[in-house]
Image: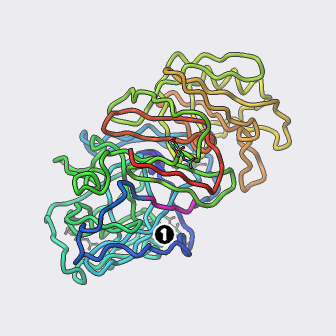
């Protein structure tokens, strides 16, 4: 979902599901008393659970409340997936299950007395009671964010200890939210240009670097096989066992988002040109959204058909048993090539109908999970590059710090 890497909240999905990350234990972390004395290997690995809900086909409009906040334009479909991990906040390590979002940049958690709006059960994934933490320091300033799907959160900025994956960072700025229409807290790990704060501050990945836990604001993302319910994000590290060949480093083309340039897609012997269009890599967006020109051509070739609801909008559907030949090969500006099996272009929704995996979007192109899970990605926010290689699904690992 975008305000995206939605691991993206760009189109934040309302995640109404019960206990997400059960079974993910918070690894025994550093005690606060121990501080950062124990040396980190230079990376922090964080497993997440994939949370899915049916896609709601509809039209939404992206907007933000003030000029400072910039959101990735919205897809036409209310997205179905998100990634949730366990973190802890406060001196007494109050557990929270939060959505990891590359499409936004702020961390916020749900206050114990928060009001949940729009029928979300916002307090079922952990709450924060600042009074129970000896290290909470309120900044007294108001936090307010609106995501691409129009869900909102409001609360107060403060600082406290945040722990996950066996480490903890101190004095991290985040928001204690007392009113939200989002189903759970969010850990935004995007560029600081996306922060919902008038003054820029070190967000979680930057603090990891500032406090010496990682040496670069970079993280790699492994979404795992289609249908898998878990994946891994490694802050400051890369798992060489999980890709074929070499990572090819593509430049980030828009500074406010994590976009790279998609040159063309090759499918069934035909080359479809994308003119180096900027595509956002958004985990959290289920399908992919490309320029209408390109998508119309590919959809026609694949036998997908346009469905136009009465209220406007529209989307491509495809027969669920369509037999599409071969792979779609995505070619990027600096040479990265990722093959996506055509089965990924048939997305079976809960209503029994199938959505075509590429949908037209003129407001901002997004490569979502159906692309991303075939790539191993290293987002480098310091160098503004994204390393990409064809993913290798394996439980083996060979992680080194970047
Ligand atoms: C979804 O479509 C319905 C009409 O079918 C419309 O009333 C509603 O406002 C739409 N929701 C959004 C978020 O656009
Ligand atoms: C919340 O749930 C109630 C009862 O099911 C329903 O009437 C109401 O429309 C819902 N509100 C929203 C914002 O979805
Ligand atoms: C939330 O916090 C703000 C700022 O502290 C306050 O003005 C507001 O009344 C609070 N809202 C609720 C629902 O507690
Ligand atoms: C781990 O990855 C590094 C870097 O690619 C490589 O040099 C090394 O041989 C790998 N180790 C194993 C055991 O595969």
Q: Main secondary structure of the magenta part?
A: strand
What residue is drawn where x is 39% and y is 60%? 186
Residue 116 against residue 74 in the figure, above or below: below
Which image quadrant: the C terminus? top left
Vertical position of residue 13 compared to residue 369: above or below? below
**Residue at disc 1, secondary structure:** loop
Instruction: Provide residue 393's location: percent of width, then percent of height.
Output: 65, 49
Find out whether residue 318 is within the magenta segment.
no
Q: Closest to the observer: 348 or 76?
A: 348
* Residue located beneath label 1 in the image: 119
Mark 1, other Cα within 10 Å: few <14 / some 14–19 / many ≥20: few
Describe residue 196's horizontal placement relative to residue 235 as left or right. left
Mark 1 CB within 8 Å of ligand 2: yes
Q: Position of residue 357 (x, y in %)?
A: 67, 38
Nearer-the-camera pick, 262 or 38 = 38
Q: Quadrant of ligand 3?
A: bottom left
Q: Is residue 394 left or right of residue 30?
A: right
Of residues 154 and 174, the one nearer the viewer is: 174
Say how the picture is coloured. rainbow
Looking at the rendering, the stretch of residues picked out in magenta corresponds to 45-50
């Amino acid at each position: 979902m975008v305000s995206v890497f939605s691991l993206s909240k760009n189109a934040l999905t309302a995640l109404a599901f019960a206990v997400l990350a059960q079974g993910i234990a918070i690894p025994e972390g550093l005690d606060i008393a121990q501080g950062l004395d124990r040396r980190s290997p230079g990376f922090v690995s964080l497993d997440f659970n994939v949370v899915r809900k049916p896609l709601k086909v509809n039209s939404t409009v992206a907007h933000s409340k003030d000029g400072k906040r910039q959101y990735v334009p919205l897809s036409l479909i209310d997205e179905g997936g998100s990634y949730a991990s366990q973190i802890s906040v406060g001196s007494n390590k109050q557990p929270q299950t939060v959505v990891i979002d590359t499409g936004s940049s702020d961390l916020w958690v749900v206050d114990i007395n928060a009001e949940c709006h729009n029928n979300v059960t916002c307090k079922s994934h952990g709450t924060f009671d600042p009074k129970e933490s000896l290290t909470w320091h309120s900044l007294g300033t108001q936090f307010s964010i609106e995501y691409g799907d129009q869900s909102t959160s409001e609360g107060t900025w403060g600082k406290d200890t945040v722990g996950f994956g066996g480490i903890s960072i101190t004095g991290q700025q985040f928001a204690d939210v007392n009113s939200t229409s989002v189903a759970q807290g969010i850990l935004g790990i995007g560029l600081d240009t996306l922060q919902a704060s008038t003054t820029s501050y070190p967000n979680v990945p930057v603090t990891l670097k500032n406090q010496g836990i990682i040496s670069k604001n970079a993280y790699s993302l492994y979404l795992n096989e289609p249908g898998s319910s878990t994946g891994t994000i490694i802050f400051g590290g890369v798992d060489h066992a999980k890709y074929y060949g070499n990572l090819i480093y593509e430049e980030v083309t828009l500074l406010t988002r994590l976009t790279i340039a998609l040159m063309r897609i090759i499918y069934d012997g035909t080359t479809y040109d994308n003119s180096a269009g900027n595509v956002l890599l958004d985990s959290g967006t289920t399908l992919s959204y490309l320029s209408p020109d390109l998508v119309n051509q590919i959809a026609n070739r694949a036998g997908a058909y346009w469905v136009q609801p009465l209220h406007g909008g529209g989307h491509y559907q495809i027969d669920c048993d369509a037999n599409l030949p071969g792979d779609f090969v995505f070619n990027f500006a600096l040479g990265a090539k990722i093959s996506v099996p055509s089965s990924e272009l048939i997305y079976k929704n809960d209503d029994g109908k199938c959505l075509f995996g590429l949908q037209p979007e003129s407001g901002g192109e997004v490569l979502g999970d159906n692309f991303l899970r075939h790539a191993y990605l290293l987002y480098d926010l310091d160098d503004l590059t994204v390393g990409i290689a064809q993913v290798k699904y394996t439980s083996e690992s060979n992680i080194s710090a970047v």
